[in-house]
Structure formats: C-alpha cells, structure tokens
Image (cartoon, rainbow, N blue to C red):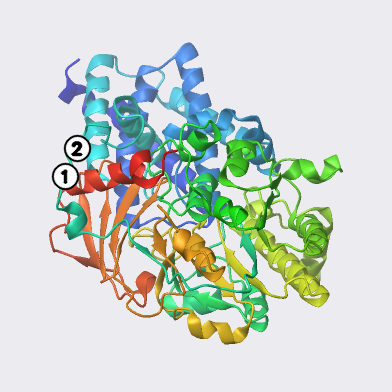
Amino acid sequence: MRLPVVLTDRRFLLTVLLAFGWLLLVRAGHILQSGVWPSPLGTFGGDLAGAFILAVLLTITSGPCRAVLVLLLGVAAYVAGMHLMAHGTLFQLAFAGKGMNPTFISGSLINVYLILLPVYIGFAWTLHRIHRALIPQPPAACTALTTSAVAVVLVYGLSFPSLTTPANNIVASAFAQIPGAIVNPVGTAISDEAVDTDKSLEARTNFFHQQITSRPNNNPPNVLLIMIEGLSGGYLPSISSYHGLEPAVALEHLEGTLQDRGFRLYRNTLSMERQTDRGTFAIICGRYPDFRRPSNKMLDVAEERTHPDCLPSKLKDNGYYTAYWQAAPIAYMNKDKFMPRAGFMDVTGAEHLSNPKDIDGWGPPDPIYFNDVATRLQELDQKTSPWFVTLLNVGTHHPFNIGQEAEQEIATDEAETNGNSTETIMVQPQQARRNAMRVMEKSLGNFLERLETAGTLDNTLIILTSDESGGFVRSDHESLPLNSNLGVLALRPPEQSDFSHYADRNVITAQLDIPMTILDATGYGDQAGGMIGRSLLVTNDRTRRDILLADTYTGLKYFLRESGQLLACTEMLTRCTSWSFNPKRVFGTFQESDKPPFLSLEDRLALFEDAAAPNRVEEQR
C-alpha cells in the first residue's frame, strides 16, 4: 500500500486520534503526579509527533510484539512520571544502566510509588484493547509506515533543543534519543583529538579562572561543610522573591534559622551540574565536574587513574582532621574509594548506623542522621587539632523518606489543619518533597542549636550548600535557561565582624568557589594549585570570569559570562541561543537576544574538551 493512501486511510487516522487522546491522558496524569506544567506550544507539537509514532506502532504490531509494546509503554509512562516528579524532566535513555545498581533499585525504585507501575501498564493495556476493538484489521503497510515514523523521529529530534524537557513527548523523545545514544554514547562530540584548540582561546575567555587572597591566618578555624541533597536556593523565600520566581517549596523556617544564626545567603549561586557525584567533585576538588553523559571523574580518582590535589588533602597536610560523613551507602558512586584518596581521613555512610531499620533504601531519615553526626562532631571537637567535616544528608532525595515518626507528626498536623487525613502524597504534586524539606529544616535547625549550645561551633566556619540544585517548579519552567542550576550558598564565619572581609550577597558565586573560600579562610590560599574558582574573601578587583555549566537531565550546556551574557546550547553544542541578564539578578532577568553566539563552535568544543581532559584540570602525580 502506498504511503499517501495509508496515511489517509480512515483506520490509520482513527488510530492517530486514539493515540493522541491516550498521550494527553498520560500527560494529565504526569501533571497531577509531578505538578510540572509544560509549555502549551511545545506540548502540542510533541504530542502530535508522539501520536503519529505510537499510531504506527499500534498498526504494525501484533501478538508478542504488541505485548512488548504495552509493557514498554507502561514502564515508560511510569518512569517519565517519576522523573518529572523528582527532577522536573523526562528520563534520559543514556542513564538506563544506572537503574541496575542495587543501591539505586532499593533507594529509588522500591518505594510507595511503585504502585503506579501496574496502573500505567494497565493504562497501556486499555489502549491496546480499545484499538483492537475499534480497528480489528489495521492497514497492512509496515514498510511505508515505518519509513514515515523514522522521518518524524528525525524531524522531531532536530526541532527540539532538548529531548527531555517537560514539553517533550515520552514516545517521540524516547525514539529521538536512540540515534544519539548509538552514534555518540558520551553525549558530546569531543575526544582527545576532536578539536585543535585555538591558542588565543584562553586570552579571549576566562573559563578557568582562579582568584584568591592568600591572607595568612594565625588561628585557623574549624570548617563544617553541610551539603543538603537537592536543595535549591529558589526554595528560600527571600531569594525566590528577589528573582521573581514561583517555587513549589518555600522554606521559611530554614531561612529564619539561618538568619537568626548569623548566616549570609548568597542570591546568585550557580550549581554546576545535576547528580550528586558531579556536584560533589566540584565542591571537594575545586574543578569542573564531568559534563559528559557518563560521570567518570570521581571513578577515575577511585581507580587511581588520576590524582587531583583536592581540598581535604590540602587541609590534612596542614594539620586538619578531615572527615566525610554521609547518610547514603558509602560505596554508591565509589565514594568509599574516592573520599580517602581525596584526603578524607574518616569516611562513613549509612553502614555506620547499627540499626538496620535506619539504613533501608538510601539511608537514615534526617532526624536520625543529624542527631548521629551531632554526637560525633561533639566528640571530634575534643581533639586538639582543627577539623574539616563534610556532611551530606539523604532525606531530601527521592523518594523522600522522612521516617515513621515524622510521617505521623505531619499526618496529625494535616488532620488538625484540614480535618481530613485521607489524602495521600501521590495525589498532591510535590507534597512528598515539601514534607521532606520540612523535616530537613527542622532537623538541621535542631542540629545547629545543639552544637552551638555545646560550644562545638566556636571558631568554626560553616557553609551550607547542596550537592546539586534539584530544580523547582515555576510558572515558566521551560522558557528560561538555568532552571536546574539555581544553587544555594549560605555562610557563617567564626565572628560576625568577619563578614567585612567577605563578598557582597549579590555577587555571582558557584560551587567552584566553595573550596577556594575554605582554603582562603583557613590561611592556605597560596596552596590552591590547580583549583579553579574565586574565593568569597576576594572583595576588591574581582576579575569578571566565564563559567561552564550544564544540565545532564536536559542535555543542555551553558557558557556564562559574568558581564551578563549566556549561551544555552544543545548537548552536541551545535545550536545555541543567546541570552542577556543582570549580573546582580541572574535568575530573574533573562532576556533572549538575537545576537550571534559569542563563541564559535570550535571554541565551544575546545572549552568542554579542556574541562573534561585530566591534564587540563587535574594535576598528575
């Protein structure tokens, strides 16, 4: 049967309409589940393409192939809904292998939300039954329809800068990601000899900037670095109000706690990338994270292929006791090997807790975790040497385990407030995240109060940040860049008078600046070596720099200039959109510009190659 004939066949057109209606219902389910509203124009175009592809699949499959199709549709709809709820994006096919990790399975897959999987599979089976009832004999045109579906996939892939934003269609997006995953599994067009770096590039740009005061300090402070899993600065009311954002979570209590305890909140903080290992690498080692699909920088250190001179190693060499205490299992992401080689002397994870009930899934809920590390910090403070302790909680990581006691308290509060406790978190978009953040801010507040009362925090520099910015739902979720790069940074020096030495709260900061600031504050700034970033103790003659960022979940890559320019580029760096912004209000002033990219394709490729290459950002031993 010829293509024009089959495309106008009543049976095929009815199948397209059926597929389109089904995808709209799936879309509605995802919105109810996640609270993420996609842009209408992109949604309509994506669902049309997805409906055509799905109609072709329904037409050409039968028997076992149809059973596989139903199963895959159900699983894809389930995973997409979970990913939208947790990360604000659709899934990346390239990360499918991550789901095979036992820790990931027990932490993120086996939870209360798993009940939605048979629901979505049943929904796909209903589509199959309706299609068979309406069209018992589909048109026989497998070759023509397959060819046309491939053409739609290609056009779709070229039409969207990202294939995983909320406006994308799960069917069309999944198929459009296949060619890139096969042709270029690392996600960028760079390799050891892919680009001849222009010798003038470093003179024209400033993406590997290092600036530090190197002031001596005769009384080096203790350092407490607190990383809150997935915390975005947009969740703090004063910051979201400053930028004119509409977050799904408002942490008034946390912000009040920080202000009462003398913290300074930085309003323009950039989170370099998504995923814990990427952000942690930048914070611990003062270098760019891995911007490629596979994140290998931490693995390379764990397996001793590279030897970066990281912050804890520098502090240990200067007499500090260095400790890394996280809530999640320590072997996940190879942290059991990476952290000691980065310079931490005391490294523990969920296994440190003796009660097995406290370490189910990703690890202990925040009340248990913060109580445990508070006790250990008080014991550590009895040592005569200064200490550097890094913490990472897990309660604010999907599936947002807050513990039975906290669940009962919240259920009681909601029952008293609403007079109805029958609603479940699965029908309240982002409510599980809100509850987890609510428990975290209370646990963290109690933690700081306990240590301050005991005198443990005397002569201590405290920095609160996040491993990554988990993103937040806002009314224009897709129309602006850096949606998932709004980081958080709050700082409290040992004495309030010390703030006169620190940069203003409105300067642009990044995760790279945290290790530089710590090294500078402890008096060892002259040992920065190959680190990049700018210490917050630099207040005069702050050189305007350039910064590389990315969002691995959307595949977008960014080139930011502190003067007020931004390039938002596709994963392959071939297409870019220019933006301008006010350097004092980065996230609230983006305006699309018709100016050509301020970097050529060759420059863009070379910069990301430089950021990825060990010999560029890491010191070989």
Residue 462 lies in quadrant: bottom right
Describe the element under mark 1 as helix, strand or loop: helix
Q: Tell me, yes or no, whether the two marked residues, 1 and 2, touch with CB atoms within 8 Å.
A: yes
Q: Look at the numbered disc 2 and give the secondary structure of its residue.
A: loop
Query: Looking at this view, is 536 or 573 the one in front?
Result: 536
Q: Is residue 557 left or right of residue 155?
A: right
- Looking at the rendered structure, the kind of residue marked 1 is Glu
Residue at 58% across, 28% down: 100
Label drawn at residue 602: 1
Tell me the crowding category of disc 2: few under 14, some 14 to 19, or many 20 or more residues within 10 angstroms, Cα based: some
Spatial CA distance of label 1 from label 2 is 7 Å
Is 166 positioned to the left or the right of 517 in the image?
A: left
> Relative to 9, is 608 above or below?
below
User: Quarter holding the N terminus?
Assistant: top left
Residue 195 got which mark?
2
Q: Position of residue 528 (x, y in %)?
A: 45, 58
Q: Nearer the viewer, residue 372 or 44?
A: 372
Question: In percent of the image, x 44 and y 81: which residue is there?
Answer: 504
Residue 95 vs 227, above or below: the answer is above
Image quarter where the C terminus lies is top left
Residue 188 image offset from top left, x and y in percent = 30, 37
Residue 119 in sight in this render:
no
